[in-house]
Amino acid sequence: MSEPIVLLVEDDPEDVLFFKRSLVKAGFSWNVRVAEDGQKAVDQLSGPASGLSHVLLDLKLPVKSGLEVLEWIRKHPALGSLPVIVLTSSDVPSDVERARSLGVDAYLIKPLTTAALVDTIRTIADRWKLA
C-alpha cells in the first residue's frame, strides 16, 4: 500500500508540530500536507489528483472556517466521502452539531495529550486501513 497522504488543516504551528510528533510516536510515516487556513485547504483539495487519504480539520481558521471547508468537501462530488476528522478546541454545542450534520467522521476536542492523539492516530489507521 502506498503511503497515506493526510491534509492537516491547522493554523497553529505548535499544533502542527504536535501532530507530526505524535504520528512518529504512533509508528507511522504518513505524508502530511499542511494548510494554514481554510482557503488554502480548499485550494489543495481542488488541485489535480490530490490523492488524500483523509483530512484533519481545525474549525477556528483564518479566511474560511473549518465548517465552511467541511461543507465544501461534502458538496464536492469527488470528495464527498473523504474521511474528515475535526480536531479543534471548540466544544460549542452548535459547532459539534453542525459538524455532525455535515457528516464529520470524528470530532475531537483539543488539547489532547500525546497518548490520546497517538491512540486516535492508530484508530484512524485501523479504521481506514492506513497502517
Image (cartoon, rainbow, N blue to C red):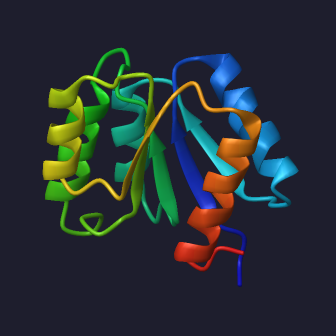
**Residue farthest toward the bottom in the current orientation of the protein:** 1
Direction from residue 13 to residue 64 in the image, left or right: left
Q: Is residue 74 left or right of residue 13?
A: left
The residue shown at (85%, 49%) is: 24
Q: Quadrant of the N terminus?
A: bottom right
- Residue nearest the viewer, comparing 93 with 125: 93
- 75 is higher (above) or lower (below) than 36: below
52, above or below 108, in the image: below
Frontmost residue, 115 versus 37: 115
Residue 53 place in picture, x, y as percent: 52, 66
Position of 126 relative to 97 (above/below): below
The quarter of the picture where the C terminus appears is bottom right
In the image, is 10 to the left or to the right of 126?
left
The residue lying at 63 percent from left, 69 percent from top is 125
Q: From this view, report whether residue 82 is shown above or below residue 95.
A: below
Total numbered labels: 0
Which quadrant would residue 91 be assigned to in this image?
top left
Q: Which residue corresponds to the image point at 72% horizontal and 50% vertical from the top-left?
A: 118
Q: In the image, residue 97 lies at what x, y percent? A: 16, 40
* Left or right relative to 119: residue 57: left
Does residue 49 appear in this view? Answer: yes
Q: Position of residue 27 (x, y in %)?
A: 86, 60
Residue at screen point 35% across, 59% down = 105
Residue 81's spot in the image, x, y percent? 29, 69
Q: Does residue 52 appear in this view?
A: no
